[in-house]
Image: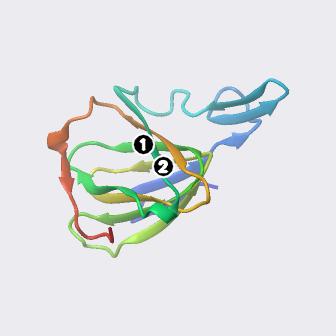
Amino acid sequence: MPRSYLHDRVRVDRLKLDAPDSGPMKRQNEKGEMWQVVNGEWPAAQHILIWTLDTPKSGASRGHHFHTNRVERTYVIAGEIELLIQPNDRALPGMLVPLIAGERVIIDHGVAHCYRSKGNIPAIVMEMGEQPYDPMDTTPFDGFPK
């Protein structure tokens, strides 16, 4: 079941197990696993990035910023993470969104975000953008714990 936060400015859904090939799905059989993360329902990607996040023991986190124009789309490949979100103007209180492997999230521009690992294994995340990455579109946000 899809979830949304901050008045639908952050949306999360999970790949359906053994769904038809026509949409996002996850399939597992004797050959292994297959994830169809996107199949036409998102804009074409001009930027794809894979990143990892160590276990909570390290205290590592990623993000602590917002984008002025970019909509950030991520897919959790492995592990568990916590996504901290808050509008950059702080008009709404911040929220913590738990994410697990197999979930996709869309973060609208203007929403500050920070990722931190939650589980016992490092997390692996794929990030996609419909424009090439532009560092001038990324603004630091100091409203989250380090």
Q: Residue at x 37, y 64 (%)?
A: 85
Mark 2, residues whose alpha carbon is within 10 Å: few (<14), some, or many (≥20)? many
In the rendered structure, which disc, 2 or 1, sits on the residue that comes first in sequence? 1
What is the quadrant of the N terminus in the image?
bottom right
Q: Quadrant of residue 69?
A: top left
Which mark is on residue 19? none
The residue tagged 2 is 105
The reply to whether the C-beta atoms of the residues labelled 2 and 1 are less than 8 Å apart is yes
Mark 1, residues whose alpha carbon is within 10 Å: few (<14), some, or many (≥20)? many
Q: Residue at x 47, y 44 (%)?
A: 52
Q: Residue at x 57, y 34 (%)?
A: 37
Residue 98 locus on image (x, y percent):
54, 63
Q: Quadrant of residue 22?
A: top right
Q: Residue at x 52, y 58 (%)?
A: 55
Q: For this rendering, which residue is in front, 119 or 83?
A: 119
Residue 24 locus on image (x, y percent):
62, 35
Q: Amino acid at mark 2?
A: Val
What is the quadrant of the C terminus in the image?
bottom left
The residue tagged 1 is 73
Q: Amino acid at mark 1?
A: Arg
Residue 88 locus on image (x, y percent):
23, 63
Q: Quadrant of residue 43?
A: top left
Q: For this rendering, which residue is in front, 55 or 89?
A: 55
Q: Is residue 142 left or right of residue 47?
A: left
Residue 141 locus on image (x, y percent):
22, 62
**Which residue is situated farthest in the right direction here?**
30
Secondary structure type for disc 2: strand
Q: Is residue 126 left or right of residue 16?
A: left
Query: Alpha-carbon distance for marks 2 and 1?
Result: 6 Å
